[in-house]
Image: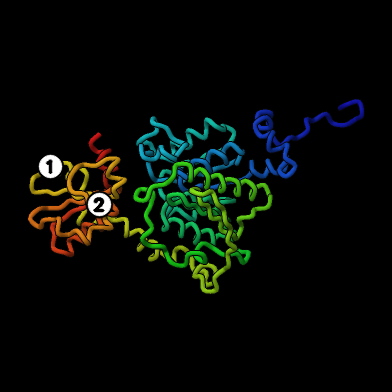
């Protein structure tokens, strides 16, 4: 007992001494303060994708003191990732991304809980991973997964932050199901087709950093109870001329998720069809087989990339950009087996299919130059 008769028990405190020092710049902000920082500490966030977008998102969320972060990614670190995926270094190549990211974030902030899930988001695990979360961040690079995130979050009434990147352009939005706001399917009712990914179209290295920081910014504000201007709005970013534009979103009256309330399980066929496009094609040949035949006199190599791409690196053979192929068929001989190649195998497969319809014997290098180069290193 003290002299005034009160019990001399230590007063409860929200943070340890090391936490207070770590987060003091947040706590000093009147808009966040100790209460907002405590909200961050008590939050559970699921980040799906640990690559270009996931790298800045995870670094800033971990640094900000998000108490529990679940990292979901079924991919491994590759040399081509290091141009933009700043979580990783040379020593991480061939390591599972989620595990490597967890190790890096543990060094940054040992005060938080990190779970690494080394498998892609799927119908089998999406609900169990998303259900405990206070917020989900979509840092993926494919539409099928993005629709799955939307549909599960809509069913479970979970807010999520979306971002996507393409060359010099980016998009970002916060979706909050259950309050009459639009969902991702309201914005994109049908899955876009013919959109080249980063492997084919390229991407400015800092662009995922820019969009990832916008995601992290909205996430921190949302969890701390601050205004989130991207809620039900779509931010459009053009890095080439540094312009920003916001679009107000409107809920669709015939959205199969918002209005018809179909769950992810009911939309199983949709994801199956989307994922089927990633399966191997009979015209594709492996990097190993390509290596064994590329110098054969009966084989003609056909580079279908752009002139700029070819000037950076090529493997000899004939060069006809895919856009010019139809008008230059006369340059090709039907007496040889044509093996098409490009950066990632997407354009070369289109070329091979086009040539096959015209009676040529042809193949496409699966995975493109990137896969072949890794196999011969």
Would residue 357 be seen by someone viewing this image from the given angle? Answer: yes
Residue occupying the far right of the picture: 4
Residue 204, x across and y down, in percent: 44, 44
Would residue 132 be seen by someone viewing this image from the given angle? Answer: no
In the displayed structure image, the side of residue 32 where residue 335 appears, left or right: left
- Position of the N terminus, as image quadrant, is top right
Residue carrying label 1 = 295
Q: Name the one closer to the observer, 247 or 212.
A: 247
Instruction: Please say if 149 is above or below 263.
Output: above
Q: Residue at x 45, y 47 (%)?
A: 49
Q: Name the one closer to the observer, 272 or 311.
A: 311
Q: Name the one closer to the observer, 252 or 16.
A: 252
Residue 278, x across and y down, in percent: 32, 55
- Mark sitting earlier along the chain (2/1): 1
Give the class, few, some or many, for how many residues have Cα within 10 Å of label 1's Cα (few <14, many ≥20): few
Distance between mark 2 and mark 1 Cα atoms: 18 Å
Q: Residue at x 58, y 58 (%)?
A: 246
Where disc 2 sits, the SS reads loop
Where disc 1 sits, the SS reads loop
Instruction: Please say if 243 is above or below 79.
Output: below
Q: Name the one closer to the observer, 60 or 339.
A: 339
Residue 115, x across and y down, in percent: 50, 41
Q: Residue at x 12, y 48 (%)?
A: 299
Residue 292 falls in which quadrant of the image?
Answer: top left
Residue carrying label 2 = 304
In the displayed structure image, the side of residue 80 where residue 351 appears, left or right: left
Residue 156 falls in which quadrant of the image?
Answer: bottom right
- Position of the C terminus, as image quadrant, is top left
Q: Nearer the viewer, mark 2 or mark 1?
A: 2
Q: Residue at x 71, y 43 (%)?
A: 32
Give the class, few, some or many, for how many residues have Cα within 10 Å of label 2's Cα (few <14, many ≥20): many
């Amino acid at each position: 007992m003290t002299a005034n008769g009160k019990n001399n028990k230590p007063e409860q405190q929200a943070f340890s001494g090391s936490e207070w020092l770590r987060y003091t710049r947040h706590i000093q902000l009147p808009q966040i303060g100790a209460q907002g920082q405590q909200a961050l500490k008590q939050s559970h966030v699921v980040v799906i994708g640990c690559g270009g977008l996931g790298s800045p998102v995870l670094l800033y969320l971990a640094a900000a003191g998000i108490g529990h972060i679940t990292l979901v990614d079924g991919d491994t670190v590759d040399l081509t990732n290091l141009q933009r995926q700043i979580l990783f270094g040379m020593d991480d190549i061939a390591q599972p991304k989620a595990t490597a990211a967890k190790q890096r974030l543990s060094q940054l902030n040992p005060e938080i809980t990190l779970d690494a899930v080394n498998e892609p988001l799927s119908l089998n695990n999406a609900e169990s991973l998303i259900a405990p979360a206070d917020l989900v961040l979509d840092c993926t690079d494919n539409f099928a997964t993005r629709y799955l995130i939307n549909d599960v979050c809509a069913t479970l009434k979970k807010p999520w932050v979306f971002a996507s990147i393409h060359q010099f352009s980016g998009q970002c939005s916060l979706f909050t199901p259950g309050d009459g706001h639009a969902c991702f399917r309201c914005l994109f009712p049908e899955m876009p087709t013919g959109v080249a990914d980063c492997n084919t179209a390229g991407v400015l290295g800092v662009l995922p950093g820019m969009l990832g920081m916008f995601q992290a910014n909205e996430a921190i504000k949302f969890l701390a109870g601050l205004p989130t201007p991207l809620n039900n709005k779509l931010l459009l970013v053009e890095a080439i001329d540094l312009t920003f534009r916001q679009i107000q979103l409107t809920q669709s009256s015939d959205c199969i998720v918002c209005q018809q309330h179909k769950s992810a399980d009911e939309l199983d066929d949709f994801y199956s069809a989307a994922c089927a496009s990633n399966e191997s094609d009979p015209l594709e040949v492996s990097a190993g087989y390509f290596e064994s035949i590329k110098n054969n006199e009966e084989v003609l190599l056909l580079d279908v990339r752009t002139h700029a791409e070819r000037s950076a690196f090529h493997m000899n053979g004939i060069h006809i950009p895919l856009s010019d192929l139809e008008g230059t068929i006369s340059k090709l001989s039907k007496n040889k087996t044509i093996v098409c190649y490009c950066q990632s195998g997407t354009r070369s497969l289109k070329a091979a299919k086009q040539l096959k319809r015209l009676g040529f014997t042809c193949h496409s290098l699966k995975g493109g130059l990137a896969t072949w180069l890794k196999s011969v290193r």
